[in-house]
């Protein structure tokens, strides 16, 4: 009995030590994070002191964040990282891109490893409330959709009773899928994969009947569908959207100046599109007769108190362009994804993007 | 006396450090506004799980249990298969037949030197997914094979099982009695006892009798192929197949080496003595070498079993809904990561301690008792 006792307690105590080690390790990180949390509300100051912005991103979503063959980051989310750097530091290249996984992202934010998270993260109550994060102005209104082979009979979700659905794990996707099918009284088998490549293989081989993800991601997959599999035309994305996925920047709780700086960077790109200011004409627009345009571009004697340079909007627009330019270049008409503006159009065109007045 | 004092001081130190770290974590999490309660386990899960009738409105704890169940199924099937294959290959590596010996060596060397994840992905992507799609499945009536899984004929309950189970229970008691009777007879007369054969015969008779006496309480469930999948029958999903094959092949190659080493560790004199007694090669292995080798191989085998259970977490790569997969889904959904990972660690700890306990008991039973 003694022997057994020893054999049980020994591994237990070793585990205890290991656990302690892990926690000790994370405590080390807290040391850095301590600055973040301890002196609250100074991320803006710290970023300006440091001279670079640590931006948490995804590096594997076509259109939103990918690494090019030249080793550059590009995409919709990447452009917003650059926009923030341009607004706060006056240099769109002063960004340290930090790819983070779905599991890491909030921890990375809380620990101070990244200053802002711009990584297709859906704004939900629980994340806003329980993750110690604050969600800012939505940059992209996404929704979960379903992609099926073009030669299948599936036209609507109702046609898909009893199907097997491939899901990329790690977001609210499984939850929305189950909710959508249950609401329609349909059965389904979810197969949730860890990485896109394995999922794509399974889908190509007919292991599953549908592939569900955010529509923006599905469009990305569809646009790069291999030619020997029939190219993009072999796939069809159903019209239905069965979730609301507002995506936008996320910062730590309790840091209003920093949150406001990023919010108004995003707003500036939207306002610029509304005013017709583009990266091409921004210099001429400085002399525009419209007082509001001149105020946005820092030509009027106006201090918003946001702690941003007077010409932050000019810096942003010169660096990445207005909202429409960012959209078209990365995910819209000028990109392989070819997404419609849809909900992401200006409110004047029937979309949801509406900028509060800059005055 | 000094030793006791030293032990006490050490204990106080360890407890103190652990408490300090724990309170530090709690304080920091609290400062960052991250909750530390385990209440999330009681919230409704919201997602479904493949190949189970898990109801999404049930709580997360129930979902994790389904995951634990899947981990247990693949682990125990893997342990059983890997042990059988491992023993056969390990013995074959010591065969006097050149071809058998070399084949076994090739098996071990190729599998042992490849990461288990690669083996699993290979079987999933390059073998199982390449099977015909469900529309063109191999359909033999009692077996349907496609890349949506292997479905074979199975039993289904059609009536009350009470009578059947009663007859079966009586049969089991009778079988045990027969076995004892054969053993006694063997002791008394020296006739071959064949007690296993006798007991099995009694059990089969009980099953047949119970089946008819109970009014045929179960019947055959033949797979029925549809457009999207197969109904009825017994389904082995592609994901389950791939992870089971991967774990079995990988672990069996390690077990084969353990078996070979253990057999070689049995003193040569034992084999020679068995030969001198005129035992056949099989009898020599069965009665002289393996029983002694078993004693040597139990501890390293236990290690392999633990590895197999832990490696089953690689099911995440191919959508097998084992416990790591379920908890990762939960984390992506709404569950707080630190607590969820803690739960996950606890699950594997329980599996490992359980296996350690069983193998330790077996080890103690088999250990040489010095008198």
Image (tube, coloured by chain):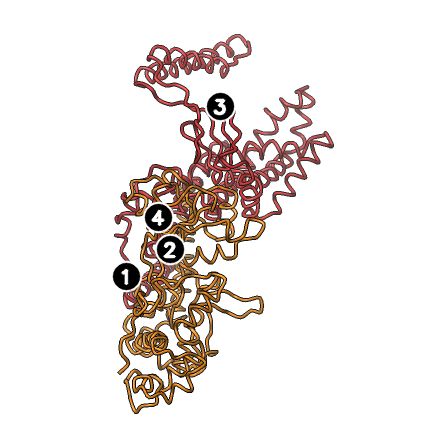
Chain colours: A orange, B red
Coordinates of residue A297 in the picture (x, y in percent): 36, 85
Residue topped by disc 3: B141
Residue in the picture at 41% in, 23% down = B221
Q: Is residue A193 left or right of residue B87?
A: left
Give the SS element for disc 1.
helix
* Mark whose residue sits in front, 1 or 4: 4
Q: Is residue B265 left or right of residue B45?
A: right
Cα distance between the residues tagged 1 and 2:
16 Å
Residue topped by disc 1: A130
Q: How many marks?
A: 4
- The picture quadrant where one finds residue B20 is bottom left
Coordinates of residue B137 in the picture (x, y in percent): 52, 32
In the image, which disc is placed on residue A171?
A: 2
Residue topped by disc 4: A177
Cα distance between the residues tagged 1 and 4:
23 Å
Cα distance between the residues tagged 4 and 2:
11 Å
The answer to whether dots 4 and 3 both sit on one chain is no
Q: Earlier in the sequence, mark 1 or mark 4?
A: 1
In the image, which disc is placed on residue B25?
A: none
Give the SS element for disc 2.
loop
Q: Residues within 10 Å of mark 1 (few under 14, many from 20)?
A: some
């Amino acid at each position: 009995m003694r022997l057994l006792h020893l054999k049980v307690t020994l591994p237990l105590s070793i585990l205890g030590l290991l656990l302690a080690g892990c926690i000790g390790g994370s405590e080390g990180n807290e040391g850095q994070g301590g600055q973040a949390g301890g002196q609250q509300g100074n991320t803006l100051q710290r970023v300006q002191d440091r001279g670079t912005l640590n931006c948490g991103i995804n590096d594997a979503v076509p259109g939103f964040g990918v690494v090019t063959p030249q080793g550059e980051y590009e995409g919709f989310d990447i452009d917003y990282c650059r926009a923030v750097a341009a607004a706060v530091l006056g240099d769109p290249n002063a960004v340290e891109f930090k790819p983070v996984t779905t599991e890491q992202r909030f921890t990375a934010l809380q620990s101070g490893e990244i200053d802002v998270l711009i990584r297709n993260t859906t704004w939900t109550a629980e994340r806003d409330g329980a993750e110690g994060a604050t969600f800012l102005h939505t940059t992209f209104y996404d929704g979960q959709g379903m992609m099926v082979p073009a030669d299948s009979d599936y036209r609507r979700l109702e046609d898909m009773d009893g199907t097997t659905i491939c899901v990329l794990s790690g977001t609210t996707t499984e939850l929305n899928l189950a909710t959508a099918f249950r609401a329609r009284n349909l059965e389904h088998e979810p197969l949730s994969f860890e990485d896109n490549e394995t999922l794509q293989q399974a889908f190509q081989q007919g292991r599953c009947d549908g592939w569900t993800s955010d529509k923006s991601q599905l469009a990305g997959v569809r646009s790069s569908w291999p030619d020997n599999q029939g190219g993009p035309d072999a796939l069809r994305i159903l019209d239905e959207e069965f979730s609301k996925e507002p995506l936008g920047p996320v910062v730590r709780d309790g840091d209003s100046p920093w949150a406001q700086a990023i919010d108004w960077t995003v707003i500036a790109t939207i306002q610029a599109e509304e005013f017709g200011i583009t990266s091409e004409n921004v210099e001429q627009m400085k002399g525009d007769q419209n007082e509001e345009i001149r105020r946005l571009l820092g030509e009027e004697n106006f201090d918003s108190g946001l702690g941003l340079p007077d010409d932050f909007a000019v810096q942003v627009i010169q660096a990445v362009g207005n909202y429409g330019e960012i959209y078209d270049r990365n995910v819209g008409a000028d990109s392989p994804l070819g997404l419609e503006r849809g909900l992401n159009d200006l409110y004047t065109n029937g979309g949801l993007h509406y900028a509060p007045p800059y005055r | 006396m000094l030793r006791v004092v030293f032990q006490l001081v050490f204990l106080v130190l360890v407890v103190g450090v652990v408490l300090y770290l724990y309170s530090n974590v709690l304080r920091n999490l609290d400062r960052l506004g991250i909750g530390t309660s385990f209440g999330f386990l009681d919230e409704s899960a919201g997602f479904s799980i493949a190949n189970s009738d898990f109801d999404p409105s049930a709580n997360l704890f129930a979902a994790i249990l389904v995951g634990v169940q899947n981990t247990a199924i693949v682990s125990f099937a893997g342990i059983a298969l890997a042990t059988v294959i491992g023993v056969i290959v390990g013995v074959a590596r010591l065969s006097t037949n050149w071809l058998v010996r070399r084949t076994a060596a090739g098996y071990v060397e190729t599998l042992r030197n490849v990461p288990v994840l690669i083996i699993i992905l290979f079987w999933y992507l390059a073998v199982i997914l390449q099977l015909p799609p469900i529309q063109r499945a191999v359909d033999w009536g009692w077996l349907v094979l496609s890349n949506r899984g292997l479905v074979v004929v199975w039993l289904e309950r059609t009536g009350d099982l009470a009578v059947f189970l009663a007859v079966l229970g009586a049969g089991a008691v009778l079988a045990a009695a027969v076995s004892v009777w054969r053993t006694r007879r063997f002791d008394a007369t020296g006739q071959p006892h064949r007690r296993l054969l006798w007991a099995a015969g009694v059990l089969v008779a009980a099953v047949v009798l119970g089946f008819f006496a109970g009014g045929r309480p179960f019947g055959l469930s033949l797979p029925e192929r549809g457009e999207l999948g197969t109904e009825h029958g017994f389904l082995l999903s592609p994901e389950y197949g791939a992870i089971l094959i991967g774990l079995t092949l990988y672990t069996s190659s390690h077990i084969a080496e353990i078996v070979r080493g253990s057999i070689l560790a049995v003193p040569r004199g034992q084999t020679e003595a068995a030969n001198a007694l005129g035992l056949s090669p099989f009898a020599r292995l069965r009665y002289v070498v393996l029983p002694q080798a078993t004693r040597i191989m139990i501890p390293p085998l236990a290690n392999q079993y633990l590895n197999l259970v832990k490696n089953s977490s690689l099911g995440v790569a191919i959508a097998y809904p084992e416990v790591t997969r379920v908890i990762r889904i939960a984390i992506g959904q709404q569950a707080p990561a630190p607590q969820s990972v803690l739960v996950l660690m606890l699950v594997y700890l329980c599996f490992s301690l359980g296996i350690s306990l069983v193998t330790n008991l077996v080890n103690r039973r088999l250990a040489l008792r010095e008198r």
